[in-house]
Image (cartoon, rainbow, N blue to C red):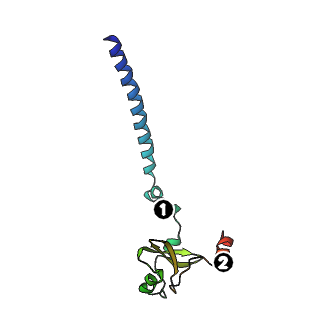
Amino acid sequence: MNRLTHFFRRLHNVLGLILGAQFVLWAASGLFFLRPIEQVRGEHLRSSAHATFAELPASAAPMDGILAATGEPVMALKVKPWLGRPVWEAETHSGKVMLDCATGQPLTPVSDADARQMAEAG
């Protein structure tokens, strides 16, 4: 019985150290949340481009023209910056299609001139 008691005491001590270390790590990582919530969320790391292109330009192409230009059903549609201008990114079953916001014309596949401009912008 003495050996069994000794074994359980050692097991209890080892498990206590493992759990104690985990609790210490949880508490230490929780101290990170004492920072301002904007830093915790990483808002200072986000690109400001989303704020620039959040609203569509007044000359934006009509939505039905945009959807028809993809040639298939659109699962998701969002505006994003590309080469200094806002473009639509339409996600379809066959992949993503980029369309010019002002004209509604497809931008994919990327033209040679746009590819050079993207490479130079680096």
Q: Which residue is mark 1?
A: 43
What is the spatial separation of the Cα atoms under label 1 and label 2, in whole angstroms? 35 Å
Instruction: Determine the residue positioned at 66% across, 78% down.
Output: 112
The disc placed on residue 112 is: 2
| Numbered marks: total | 2
Q: Nearer the viewer, residue 42 or 101?
A: 101
Depicted 65 relative to depicted 16: above or below: below
Q: Residue 101 placed where, x, y %? A: 50, 82
Looking at the picture, tell me which residue is in the foreground, 96 or 60: 96
**Badge nearest the viewer, 1 or 2:** 2
Mark 1 is surrounded, within 10 Å at the Cα level, by few (under 14), some (14 to 19) or many (20 or more) other residues, namely few
Amino acid, disc 2: Asp
Q: Measured from the top left, where is residue 6 in percent x and y?
A: 36, 15
| 53 in relation to 31, above or below | below
Q: Quadrant of residue 67?
A: bottom left
Coordinates of residue 45 in the picture (x, y in percent) = 53, 61
* Residue at x 54% of width, y 74% of height: 81
